[in-house]
Amino acid sequence: MSGWRQFMAILRKDLIRELRTREMIISMILFVLLAMVIFHYAFGVKEDVDLTYFTGGMLWVTFIFAMLLGLNRSFAQEKDERCLDGLLLCPVDRVTIFLAKTAGNLVFLLIIQVVAVPVFTLFFVHRGYGADLVLFVAVLLLADLGICALGTLLATISMNTRSRDLLLPIIFLPLIVPLLIAATAATTTIFATGASFGSTASRLLFLLGFDAVFMVAAYGTYDFAIGE
Amino acid sequence: MPLEIEVDGLRKTFGRREVLKGLSFGLERGGFLSIFGPNGAGKTTTLRVLATLLTPSSGKVSVAGHDVREDPMPVRRTIGLISHNPMLYLDLTAQENLRFYADMYGVEDRDARIDGLLDRLELSHRRYDVVRTYSKGMRQRLAIARAILHRPRVLLLDEPHSGLDPRAVDILDGLLAEIRDEHTFVMVTHNIAKGLEWGTQLMIIENGRIAYEHAAGVDPDAFVAVYREHVQEGSVL
């Protein structure tokens, strides 16, 4: 029960702070929208070019780079005024901190996607995918969870290093590639031809496995990662 | 009197650098240990080990009967840390900061406790303002509220008077006087007058070792002479 109260306290604190300053969300939304405009002009200059088969890749590359911006900022506030010390002084299981931080990053990413996905659809998707919406949301949620779990773990590890802005992408991007491949394949299928649950099941299972692996990894290592 | 803090052979290394080289001391419940020493001597590192923010490389450290390495959770419930860094979220209000920490510690009478502390620290009128708009002294007062919110038995003070205006110093001293009898204190300070005034035990740490240890009651001039022997301005002996 105390773990749940602490989880909610950290999450509430992060959400209040972000909704007040909008530092992270505004920069992520701007990045995502600008990336789409750039993709539109870079790849869509000829009217006969069919970008449908690149849509999944463009969408997830954009979200992953946007999340990198957010991850750096989400821990920068904890370093200000040594707030991290204040947090670590509390009698809280370190895994609770990880789960709350991951949940916070997930909420921010979902807010970005609520804005970005309709704009992306308008720019790049020429086929209605209403029938596959549930499947698309499932891909979105599972991939988001993996991005946020891995990202939170690595952002925690890198925050105590001098070159954290550089280190985080260097360790995050190679590790996120398997998730990127699965999410891109599933999303492209949905956007291009439509997908059944059966044809996407293996991708969804892979994403679920990816999430599980990094949640378990964080469970086992977070005490060390957030310590000295 | 039982020992509230026991340190036996504490060593701490960062990479190849040994910062603490086998400290041993004890502090009775209700005692007040004033730690002096030059910059870089290991005073704050000692405090951070007691606070469970650093893990000892070797040696045994216990607070309120709990080992800081093996059993840190009860230690964290027992201690409060007041440092020159306030550990407050600048974009939250005073009330939001205190509610956050109260929830983290499971303070049962949360709102009444926060009201009482904000009144005592003369911050009630600014409770809904974000901390970023506070002066240094006001932030430090709020940091005191944060540190004692959960009624810790042991208070760790890391240069608590540093950067405070006279009014804030008066409030801090008044508050420490009020709670003096209910707590055990460890204070790291360069302020000899304050350290001698409050301390029941005095210690000088130099280059990771205890260079001087004495019970309270030492002649201030004699202590200043000893302090000068061990601490030279801007250098580590």
Image (spheres, coloured by chain):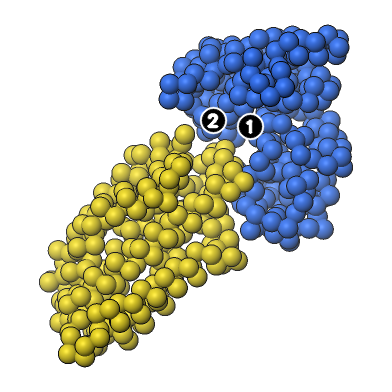
- How far across and down, in percent of the image, does residue A99 sit? 42, 51
Residue projecting furthest to the left: A199
Work out whether B85 lies above or below A146. Answer: above
Please state, as top left, top right, bottom left or bottom right, where the N terminus of chain B lies in the image.
top right
Nearest to the observer: residue A208 or residue B137: B137
Nearest-to-viewer mark from 2 and 1: 2
Report which residue position mark 2 lands on.
B52
Report which residue position mark 1 lands on.
B79
Work out whether A139 lies above or below A209. Answer: below
Label 1 crowd (10 A; few <14 / some 14-19 / many >=20): many
Task: Tell me where residue A135 sits by quadrant.
Answer: bottom left
Work out whether B70 lies above or below B21. Answer: below
User: Contact (CB < 8 A) between labels 2 and 1?
Assistant: yes
Task: Tell me where residue B178 sits by quadrant.
Answer: top right
Q: Is residue A156 visible?
A: no
Q: Is residue A121 left or right of residue B27?
A: left
Residue at image point 31% right, 57% down: A146
The amino acid marked with disc number 1 is Ile
Please state, as top left, top right, bottom left or bottom right, where the C terminus of chain B lies in the image.
top right
- How far across and down, in percent of the image, does residue B116 sit? 79, 48
Residue at image point 36% right, 39% down: A221
Q: What chain is colored blue? A: B
Label 2 residue SS: loop
Q: Is residue A183 left or right of residue B9?
A: left
Q: CA distance from mark 2 to mark 1?
A: 10 Å
Nearest to the observer: residue A35 or residue A201: A35
Shade of chain A as shown in the rendered figure: yellow
Q: Chain of mark 1?
A: B
Give the mark, 2 or 1, whose residue is nearer the N terminus.
2
Label 2 crowd (10 A; few <14 / some 14-19 / many >=20): many
